[in-house]
Amino acid sequence: MSEIPSELRFMASHEWIRVENDGTAYVGISDHAQSALGDLVYVELPEVGDTITAGDEAGVVESVKAASDIYAPLTGEVVAINEALNDNPELVNSDPYGDGWIYRIRMADPEELEDLLSAEEYAEQIEEEADDQAED
Amino acid sequence: MPYVPHTDEDVRIMLDTIGVASIDALFDEIPAEIRAKPLLEIPSGRTEMDVTRLVGERAAADGNVINFLGAGAYEHHIPAAVWDIISRGEFMTAYTPYQAEASQGTLQVIYEFQSLMAHLTAMDVSNASLYDGGSALAEAALMAVRANRKSQSGRVLVLENVNPFYCDAARNIVGNQHIEIVKVPFDATTGNVDQAALDAYAGQDFAALVVAMPSFFGTLEDVHALTDWAHANRMLMVAVVNPTALAVLTPPGEWGQKGADIVVGEGQPLGVPLSSGGPYVGFICCRNEIVRQLPGRIIGRTVDLEGKRGFTLTLQAREQHIRRSKATSNICTNQGLAMAAATIYLSLLGAEGLARVAQACHANTRKLIASLSEIPGVSVAHQSAFFHEAVLRLPKNAAEVVAALAEQRIAGGLALGEFFPDHENALLVCATEMRNDADIARYQAALRQILA
Amino acid sequence: MLIFERGQAGRRAVAQAPSTTDDLHDIPAALQRKQKPLLPEVGEMQVVRHYTNLSRKNFSIDTHFYPLGSCTMKYNPRGAHRAAMQAGFLGRHPLAHESISQGFLACLYELQEVLKGVTGMKGVSLTPMAGAQGEFAGVAMIRAYHEARKDHERKEILIPSAAHGTNPATAVMCGYKVREIPVNDEGDVDVDALRDAVGPQTAGLMMTNPSTCGVFERSVREIAEIVHAAGGLLYYDGANLNAILGKVRPGDMGFDVMHMNLHKTFATPHGGGGPGAGPVGVGERLLPYLPIPMVGKDEIEGKPRYRWLTEADIPQTIGRLSTFMGNAGVLLRAHYYASVLGREGLLRVGEFSTLNANYLMKKVQDAGFQLAYPKRRATHEFIITLNKQAKELHVSAMDFAKRILDYGYHAPTTYFPLLIPECWLIEPTETESRDELDGFVKAMVQIQAEAENNPELVRGAPYSQPVRRLDDVRAARELDLVWRPTAEQ
């Protein structure tokens, strides 16, 4: 069973969001997502200053045999990116909720947070996905 | 039937195993109304002996032509060893190296090819090859648009003296993605870029500037100044080069202050026969910073689980079989055989041998244009430095001259009227190291007679 | 060892370069290379030995059974290679005058006619250099057709979810959006979902038939009607044409445009990943848009006279896609193959490739392996799933694939199509004998026993190859794409 910190919010497409006190939020991919992708070999980051809209593609995570888009959970401006991932993409595997964060965004509309999944809802979703798989 | 080993007994056993009465019964899921009728319009089969004879006569009919044609495809000496080795079934009849452990031969050859091309162009990396020079230019334009994040226009500037076949292919391939190729005219007296026309684009939004060395006319641009101009105007520099020339001319990695960003070209001169235009081998090299934008296959060196060195396909997540609609290109193949030929050719020639080939070609072309210019009314068109190819101005329509020369089994060059306005009398000629003084004398005599 | 590492300063293959050097006084110093490129310094025999030994590290059709699904690895006749390697063809410059090119042009013209015959198409252009470029040409023609009719709203290409990745990549290269259509439990396109998806935005549908699921798409006529009724065109991906050669023609199924992979169906060598050739065929509506150059035939005083067809003949063409005219040498090999087989032989390609696949499928099923579509006929290929082995024995389809190399067989295609978990796509082709197929099944049975009794053995495979399993993660994280002397030691 993968780890799902209760203080985070999630997208159905497996991104997590951690809201800070200053109106910004960190974005990464969940423990479940990193484990499904396997060893990451590259993370394509957005650029600081990019303005992105909720639901847009904001980057890509690549393993040897798969590539997956990272969608933007919120609208806003990218204020920081995790440059350590350029040389060490494996941080997303080893610490998906900490050193493996991907970018930080200044929220334009905090109400968008309401559209995201809670930790419990996200846990239910991945359980359902696992059940579907078992039926194959 | 040819190439099917089954005996009647085999077929009977196989049908019994499957549990059907006939082979035709295996097609029972195909709706009856669309089943094919006998293919009467296709001739009956023949033996190897018969077909070999027919095709042999046709090949002979096209042979024994003495070649002064270049224009992107060059007749060089090919060491006998090159195609003897390539024709080994282990190279020729293998597939794309999906099972790396069972494909180390092909994979290592590709790694060596990538290394050779990177050193020849003085660039950081190369891919495993593309189809040919023209399609390589298309891929370079697409790559430049992806890689140049400062540019939003989807426009690429191309000097008009870049091979017009490349420009056509590139325009047709990239046009549907709303990428525009904008041509910068050349100066008729030099054959090189019209600097004033280029300067008119300074400060505008283009993803890249494309410059050829040598140009289609054989002329040599000031590639250092053009590279710096491109960078000063926030464009990537795309170089189109002849690999033979790189033995003696400044490699694109050393052009200007910062060097070119993407280098493409036709690898045919490296051990690949003229063979009517293909299979050839396009190449593409670039700087490390934009390697993830490279299209096509790329081979990397790694280790196996015992730490032994080995080679494998890498950066596959860019490719169509994983990224599907978001792939860098739809390309699946490289030009494996021709790529292997180029690798073996470069190994046999080395830096010294390739430089000698380049020097001999250039010396022969100098002799050729000197000899033909002795004929009244024939002159060299451009007052510029050139390499191993040049344009002559004739006193008569060049296409008619080419047709007349063909009757004497001389491929006399390319008539340029079809490609550039006011060039009806212009003829692009080339003499590689394969031509000797007697060949040149024969050409001069034939041309003299035709123009008389 | 790399060829670079075999070098000695100053060594070279003396016989292979001109014996004299000439000056380059007329070329400005600023444009001359200052430092020689770092190429190998080796002798001729070293080169021959190095590459001959490298060739021995490859599996190939000439050395091994190579049942790579969707790739049609059949025997590549040596006669075809020799025919294309004759001096008159090798020495012909691509821009040589037509008057000294009649032999070559005659071969190409005949090949165009054969391809029209076996596909039921009205016109064929040979110029695309690989299947992917043929796909590009085909979809570009669909686009040119709609644009010529000023039908600018058609922005979407429909693609079954099991399709090759090239299909969506190609649609995007042609400026289209992609919409996927689901495939049902028996491998057929979900026709109801298709009906819901089509509309005035539909430019066309791309389809492989037999499909990538290894089964014949039974509803193909209905699919064609639905797409045509909506104003779209049908694209046929010829990847699996080998299965139906002579039995059913794409033109008769209702397709408007298609490509053929000559390196599959017409037995030209794959060369370790190319060159291919991907001619395109079209029905009536797309004839004006075929890519150039093509070959035309005139009669002059009762004798055939071949010539290039260019923009002057086909003014609405999508144009040239290669520097010259595509992979001519591959086309000559395909011409030879078609000439030797003739209409009877081409028919039997479809028959015997289907016989071999159905026989192998039955043997594999009888040996206890799980078929992906047990209720269906195999076409020229079929899919098994090793999902049970993966779940219960923790031995994956990849492990099985690596282990079968040790038995002297190239592995089938693994993990494609994506919608079947832990799958193998197996394509034996018509040129393999019954005993070869039996030997392959025997090896599978033995690996199954190993997976049950000693799974570690299978997971650690291969053992017989020049290298053990390679570290792909390291290859991608620590990119080493070019040999440099400083990178050593």
Image (spheres, grey):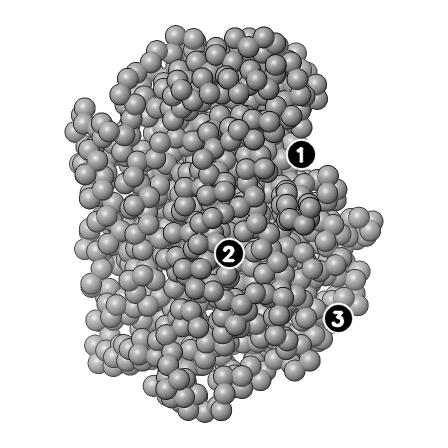
Name the residue beneath numbered marker 3: C226
Query: How far from the left and from the top, in percent, is residue A17?
Result: 53, 53
Which is closer to the viewer, label 3 or label 2?
2
* Whether residue C81 is visible: yes
Q: Quadrant of residue C88?
A: top left
Q: Position of residue C190 (x, y in %)?
A: 65, 75
Measured in 3D between alpha carbons, the distance from the residue under mark 3 to the one under mark 2, in whole angstroms, is 36 Å
Counting from the top left corner in percent of width and height, residue C459 is at: 26, 68
Residue A77 screen position, x and y as percent? 61, 40
* Residue with the mark numbered 1: B180
Mark 2 surroundings within 10 Å by alpha-carbon count, few (fewer than 14), some (14 through 19), many (20 or more) = many
In the displayed structure image, the side of residue C5 where residue C285 appears, left or right: right
- Both marks 1 and 3 on one chain: no
Is residue B347 found left or right of C214 in the rendered image? left
- Judging from the image, mark 2 belongs to the subunit labelled C
Q: Secondary structure at mark 3?
A: helix
Question: In the image shown, does C329 or C423 lie closer to the viewer?
Answer: C329
- Residue sticking out furthest to the right: C150
The residue drawn where x is 76% and y is 52% is C145
Q: Which mark is residue C335?
A: 2
Q: Secondary structure at mark 2?
A: helix
* Horizontal side, residue C434 vs residue B150: left or right: left
Q: CA distance from mark 1 to mark 2?
A: 37 Å
Q: Residues within 10 Å of mark 3 (few under 14, many from 20)?
A: some
Q: Amino acid at mark 2?
A: His
Query: Which amino acid type is marked by label 3?
Result: Ile
**Where, quadrant-wise, is the C terminus of chain C in this rendering?**
top left
Picture residue at 33% right of the left edge, 68% below the top: C65
Sequence order check, earlier mark of 3 and 2: 3
